[in-house]
Amino acid sequence: MRTLHALAAATAGAALLATTAATPPPAPHPLLTDAAVDKAVARLDATVTAMMSRTGVPGVSVAVVHNDKVVHVKGFGVRKTGERATVDPDTVFQIASLSKPVSSTVVAGVLKDPAEWDDHVALPDFALRDPWVTDHVTTADLFSHRSGLPDHAGDLLEDLGYDRTYILDHLRLEPLTPFRASYAYTNFGLTAAAEAVAEAHGVSWQKLSDDTLFKPAGMTHTSTEFAAYAHAPDRAATHVKNADGTWSPRFVRDADAQAPAGGVSSTTRDLARWMRLQLSGGTLDGKRIIPAATLARTHVPEIVSQPPTSPTGRAGFYGLGWNVSYDDSGRLRLSHSGAFELGANANVTMLPLEKLGIVVLTNGAPVGLADAVALDFFDVAQHGKATTDWLPLLASVYAKQADEARSPTDYAHPPATAKPAKAASAYTGTYDNPYYGKATVTANPDGSGLTLALGPKPQRYPLAHYDGDTFSFETRGENAVGRTGAFFADGTLRIEYLDATHLGTFTRQ
C-alpha cells in the first residue's frame, strides 16, 4: 500500500512540475501610484520629528527618490548637541555599513562582465585558515559573507588599534565554517575583496571609488576616508545616549581600517543621486555610470542570511553588499542598515520595481530610528498607513543584540564567598598571543591593583578583582561589551570577550 501511495505521489508531483514548467508564474508588476507615494512623502516630516522627540536623537537627514526624481530631501535637528548648527541635505554623516552597497557599486563599475564577480581574490596580505579556500575564494564570496569567516571577524583587532594590513594578515588564524554554505557578516572579509580589486587596478580604494562612482555621479561630498569626514565643515558629530536620556558627542569613530565595509561618509543629497543610479540600472541624468549587468548582479541573492522561521515564512538573503528579499507580491526589496555603537545609524531601502527608495542618516547610536522611518514610509506608501509602531520593535532588536554580546557574569558584584587574589607578582608580566599580539599586566605603583595593556599602542585597562584568579575590566571601543572576565591560570591569561572563536588565550613569556 505504501508503495502505491509513493507511486501516486511521484506521478502527481511529476505532473505538477510539468505544468509549472510550462506556465511559470507571472512576473510581479508595479503597484504603487504617484498619489500613494505622495501621501507617504507628505507624512514623512512628521514621522521623523515624532521619532526624534521619542528617542532624543539629535540630528537626522532624509531623502526620497521616485521615478528618477528626488521628491524629498531634508535635514532635521542639530549636527552636534550644545551647538546651534542645523542638519541640512549637505551635512556629512558617517554611514557605517551602508558603505557596503556603495562599495559593491564601485566594484560593479570596474567589472566588464557579471561573471567577473566570481573571479578569485588575490591579495598578498590576505589568507584564510584553509589553503583550498584561500585559493578559491572570490569577490562574490566575500561581498556576500559566505567565505566561512566567523561573524565580525577582525573587528576586535580594529578596536585594539591594529591597522588593516595586520588585521587582514591575521584572519588566517580564524576558524572557518563550511565555505559557501554558511553566512556570517564580516567587515574585513568584504574589505579584503574590495582592496584586492583596487590593488588589481593599481590605485587606492579611495581613488577607485572617486574615479568610478563619486566623481561621475556628482557625489561631491562622499568619501571613503575618515579625514574627509573629520575636516568637512558641515559635519554631523557622532552621539551616544547617556544614562539620563540625553545625548553627547563623546566618541570619534575612525573606520579607515575597514573603509570599504564601514568607512564611507556622505550626505543625503549625494546618496539620493546614488539611489537614482541604482534604480535606473546604472545610469544617471542620461549617462551610463555603472554597467547594467554587473550592477544587476549585486541585487541577486547569493546566500540565505535569514532562514524562514515557519513553513509559510520567507527567507531573507544577502546579495553583493545588499540585503535582498521579496515581498508578498514578489517584488524585489533591497535594503541595508549601518550602525556605529559610537554614534551613527543609517538605513537605505528600495523597491526597484516601483523606482522608489529612501535613505535615512542619523548622528546617534542605533536606537531603531533610521530603520523605523524607512519601514513607516514604505508602510504608508503601500497600505496608506503604518501597520505597526516600528520604533519600539527596532529599538528592541538593537537592544537585544547589545545584551547578547554581554557576559552572563555580573563582574561588578563579586560573590560574597570570593577567594582572595594571589600576590601581584603571580599575574604581572608579558603574555603573547598569535592573533591579538602582546598583553602586559603591571602592578600599579601605588599598590592599588593591576593594569592590563592591549594593542599595538597599548590601551590600558584597570583590572578589578572578582574571585580568586579571576579579574574583570570595562571594555572600550565600537565592540565594547561592558565588563568582561580576565582569567589567570597556569601561566596563561584568557580574556573572555576576545575568546568567542577560542583565540583569546595569551601565554606568559
Image: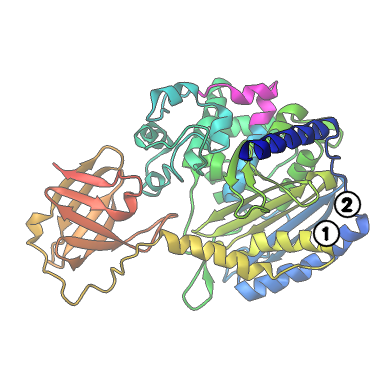
Other residues around mark 1 within 10 Å, as few (<14) / some (14–19) / many (≥20): some
How far across and how far down the image is residue 198, in percent?
Answer: 56, 27
- Does residue 113 show up magenta in the picture? yes
Q: Is residue 223 visible?
A: no
Give SS at disc 1. Answer: helix
Q: Is residue 472 above or below residue 25?
A: below
220 and 55: which is toward the camera: 55
- Does residue 17 show up magenta in the picture? no
Residues at marks 1 and 2, CA–CA distance in whole angstroms: 8 Å
How far across and how far down the image is residue 81, in percent?
Answer: 57, 69
How far across and how far down the image is residue 125, in percent?
Answer: 41, 27
Q: Amino acid at mark 2?
A: Leu
Q: Which residue corresponds to the image point at 44% horizontal and 61% vertical from the top-left?
A: 404
Magenta portion: prevailing SS class: helix
Q: Amino acid at mark 1?
A: Gln
Label 2 sits on residue:
31
Q: Which residue corresponds to the image point at 60% horizontal and 44% vertical from the top-left?
A: 99
Q: Is residue 95 above or below residue 485?
A: above
Q: Which residue corresponds to the image point at 51% horizontal and 44% vertical from the top-left?
A: 185
How far across and how far down the image is residue 20, in percent?
Answer: 80, 35
**Residue 342 relative to residue 70: left or right:** left
Q: Are marks 1 and 2 in contact (CB under 8 Å)?
A: yes
Q: Seen from this angle, which residue lies furthest front?
A: 1
- Viewport quadrant of the N terminus: top right
> Which stretch is magenta?
107-121
Label 1 sits on residue:
382
Q: How is the image coloured?
A: rainbow
Q: Which residue corresponds to the image point at 49% horizontal and 34% vertical from the top-left?
A: 147
Q: Is residue 350 above or below residue 395?
A: above
Q: Earlier in the sequence, mark 1 or mark 2?
A: 2
- Viewport quadrant of the C terminus: top left
